[in-house]
Image (cartoon, rainbow, N blue to C red):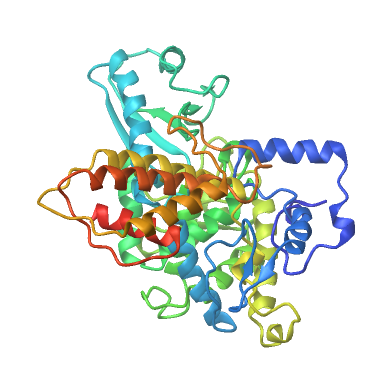
Amino acid sequence: ETKVESHASSDTQPNQAGLLLNTAEYEFGNRRRRDNRASTFGFNRSLLSISCNSTVDETGCRRVGHTDTPWKTRNYTAGILGLHEEIQDFYAYMSPRPEEEKMRREVVERIERVIKDLWPTADVQVFGSFSTGLYLPTSDIDLVVFVKFREGDTLPLWRLEEALRKHKVVEENSVKVLDKATVPIIKLTDSLTEVKVDISFNMKNAVKAAALIKDYKKKYPVLPYLVLVLKQFLLQRDMNEVFTGGISSYCLFLVAVSFLQLHSRENACSPNANTGVLLIEFFELYGRHFNYLKTGIRIKDGGCYLSKDEVQKSMLDGYRPSLLYIEDPLQPGNDVGRSSYGAMQVKQVFEYAFMVLSHAVSPIAKYHLNNHGESILGRIIRVTQEVAEYRDWITMKWAALSLNSLTLKGNVTLLVELQEMEECINNLSEEGAESPSSSSPPPSSSFSSPHSSSASSILSTHFALLHTLCSSPHTLLLGKYSDPLTFSTFCYVTALF
């Protein structure tokens, strides 16, 4: 089974034979899912059982305990315009929530305290996707530590690793010190949130790269939409780590910038450009037409393509440009794609995505029997239940923490009918789900019930907060809501306001 076929999102339903899975492959898939919540390895095999237990509502949207296209809450226009609309919804759904940002800032603060204990004068800065806002729910955090060492001293990677273990900031056995890498780093997983963190030392260009990305985001308004879709596309296929031969976020960003710079359409960089068209043409370029053997990429000075033969003439000691040669705009002699030894596998999945999406938006696609209400973007991208539950856990815990520290000013009165409150609480009781402790670890099992207790937990938290508000001299004017989720959510939003 090829990498393309093993991952999610073909445009046809899996057949019964696709559910046959030997024990060794099953266990391998589970290991990958534990390492990467977003991984869709073997995902197609589970789609049949999900579709058997799902229903289609009056709008044509499929309803299940967990939907693997949670951004799709409406039907879209047919064809390429519908793909554009769906990309907009995907971006809105996957963009960072306030609770996710708050959680990540706390992770940074915990690690920074450990670093400051070792080197009080150290300057810890965030770069990468967390700095630019282009991060996915399970993306890692990139930190760089600026600290002066005596000349000749080696980077104190092992010393920091020991300190992180001592303070129990990291998960046991999650720390990896890559001191032989081109850029020596420490890779770790935060013990409280399971957020992955990469720490490097004295890399000035790392912070400059974050500033460069922010500049290009302003210049090309469609860029964040393309990048977030592409990042999810590679992440779920385990092709987003240079450490394993994939394409780094920075490398992917530069490739997307080059695509827009050299695009033949005049409106490609307009805020109103059709992102569906651009996504398909991106996959077409880098999946079919780009000559990886002879061509390199430069984005400096407006962007251009480079002849690798010419590039090699300026390289010393017989070095050759890498398969995916991308000139670093901050350091022209540096090849950003040099470690992406799996570039041909990435090319392969790009071509796969081009074929799938091209077929999905073609005029004949509307005559497909299963076309009504189906997701076009969902044919190449899925959001796993593990990711959805992880986001729910983050929202529940950090929203509760924010509300607990909220101070309301002025005299406000809570006007809620007692009978309505009791009905809502009774509805919660009937669900029979216990509320997890705020200190409980994030969900990691891939076999939890589709009807997660997270929603009930959030509601329980909201009603506890409402009880506190009721006993204080504040007032919130609420209308009547028979649905407990709508009712409590309204209370929560009003309280924040």
Quarter of image, res 66: bottom right
Quarter of image, res 308: bottom right
| Image location (x, y in percent) of residue 97 | 38, 51
Q: Is residue 254 left or right of residue 432?
A: left
Q: Is residue 424 left or right of residue 243?
A: left
Q: Answer whether residue 106 is visible to the viewer in this image.
A: yes
Is residue 423 positioned above or below 39 on the image?
A: below
Name the residue nearer the viewer: 134 or 60: 60
Q: Is residue 106 left or right of residue 349?
A: left
| Image location (x, y in percent) of residue 46 | 76, 54
Name the residue nearer the viewer: 38 or 490: 490
Q: Answer whether residue 247 is visible to the viewer in this image.
A: no
Name the residue nearer the viewer: 64 or 3: 64
Q: Residue at x 41, y 37 (%)?
A: 142
Which quadrant does the C terminus fall into? Answer: bottom left
Q: Residue at x 78, y 36 (%)?
A: 27
Q: Residue at x 73, y 64 (%)?
A: 10
**For the view shown, which residue lies furthest in the front direction?**
419
